[in-house]
């Protein structure tokens, strides 16, 4: 095992990221020396930053909004997951050779299985969003197969593009806009409702997801937003008797997989959640 790992996260902005606390908790737990820094890199600065990365000094990076797709151009190799999803959230620097991977799909599936006890096979899923996070969730759904999926997005054309990427595997995929007259029925008949937009995130709370008032008991409602932990969507879903799953679990599980890719070490899932909850309460 290496003596000191130099890792970090790139995004724009990255000021509020929880990733440093997440990975420092795991490093301490494993007795690994870690230097983990947030790097604010705008899309215009990305080329220069990535060229510098090849020079050495940084062993690996997480990638967040809005760079997950843009960094793909700078990778020497892509994992099957990154290629399938069409985005990179983890970079491994193998002595100047940059390998792009994606652990968001794993994070999502693991949080559904372990923290919601949910097997998605043959379920009806209603997904809000068609951005980078939605791509990873659709990748997971596509791999499971047999899931009837409705993708609803403010910009309908992006939902259509995402739907067209999916293999379908015997189930149905439909793309609609937020103003579609199919929206209410699709929400009513869903087993699982997932928000993969940034609506509800601190700073984006004026907008409301359409159709939330049709959520009912018996449904599982999942939000990928974790700041605040109880988003307006989860609050309303809970009040209507639905089960809920917060976004912190997906963050932790994707981080655990990235940490393993960089260091080979395991991850203290419950301790990480405790530390992140503290951080969310204090900031
Ligand atoms: P991420 O990688 O986090 O998914 P993204 O690729 O920028 O980020 O995608 C953001 C998602 O949130 C998109 O589905 C976006 O909808 P559009 O495709 O119409 O832009 C959605 N979103 C963000 N802010 C929104 C808002 N105020 N109202 C509706 N949708 C919003």
Image (cartoon, grey):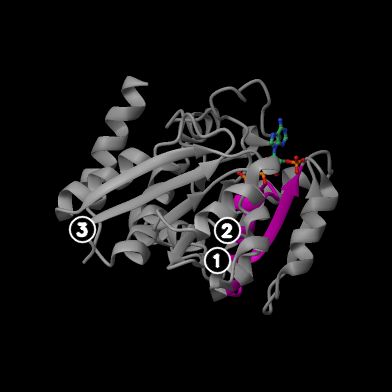
Q: Is residue 173 visible?
A: yes
Comes first in the chain, label 3 or label 1: 3
- The residue shown at (83%, 48%) is 156
Q: CA distance from mark 3 to mark 1?
A: 35 Å
Q: What residue sits right under mark 1 in the picture?
A: 140
Say if mark 3 contacts mark 1, CB within 8 Å.
Answer: no
Q: Is residue 239 above or below residue 41?
A: above
Left or right: where 257 falls relative to 196: left
Residue at 34% in and 57% down: 256
Label 2 secondary element: helix
- Residue range in magenta is 128-153
Q: Earlier in the sequence, mark 2 or mark 3?
A: 3
Circles 1 and 2 in contact, beta carbons < 8 Å:
yes
Q: Which residue is mark 2?
A: 137
Q: Secondary structure at mark 1?
A: helix
**Residue at which label 3 appears:** 3
**Dot 1, how many residues are within 10 Å of its Cα: few (below 14), some (14-19), or many (20+)?**
many
Residue 154 is situated, as x and y percent measured from the top left of the image, at 78, 40
Residue that appears at 30% across and 33% down: 277
């Amino acid at each position: 095992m290496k003596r000191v790992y130099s890792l970090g996260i790139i995004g724009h902005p990255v000021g509020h990221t929880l990733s440093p606390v997440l990975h420092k908790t795991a490093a301490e737990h494993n007795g690994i020396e870690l230097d983990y820094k947030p790097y604010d890199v705008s899309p215009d600065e990305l080329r220069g930053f990535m060229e510098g990365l090849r020079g050495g000094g940084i062993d690996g990076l997480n990638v967040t909004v809005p760079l997950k797709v843009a960094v793909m151009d700078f990778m020497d190799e892509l994992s099957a997951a990154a290629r399938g999803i069409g985005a990179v959230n983890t970079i491994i620097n193998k002595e100047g050779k940059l390998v792009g991977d994606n652990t968001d799909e794993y994070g999502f599936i693991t949080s559904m299985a372990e923290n919601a006890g949910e097997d998605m096979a043959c379920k009806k899923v209603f997904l809000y969003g068609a951005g980078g996070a939605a791509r990873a969730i659709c990748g997971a759904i596509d791999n499971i197969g047999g899931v009837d999926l409705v993708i609803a997005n403010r910009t309908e054309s992006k939902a259509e593009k995402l739907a067209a990427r999916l293999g379908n595997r015997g189930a149905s995929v439909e793309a609609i806009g937020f103003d579609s007259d199919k929206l209410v029925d699709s929400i009513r008949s869903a087993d699982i409702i997932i928000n993969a937009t940034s609506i509800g995130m601190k700073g984006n709370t004026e907008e409301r997801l359409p159709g939330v008032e049709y959520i009912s008991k018996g449904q599982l409602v999942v939000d990928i937003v974790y700041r605040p932990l109880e988003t307006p969507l989860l609050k309303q879903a809970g009040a209507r008797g639905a089960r809920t799953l917060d976004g912190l679990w997906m963050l932790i599980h994707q981080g655990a997989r990235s940490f393993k890719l960089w260091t080979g070490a395991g991850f203290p899932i419950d301790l990480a959640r405790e530390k992140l909850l503290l951080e969310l309460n204090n900031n």
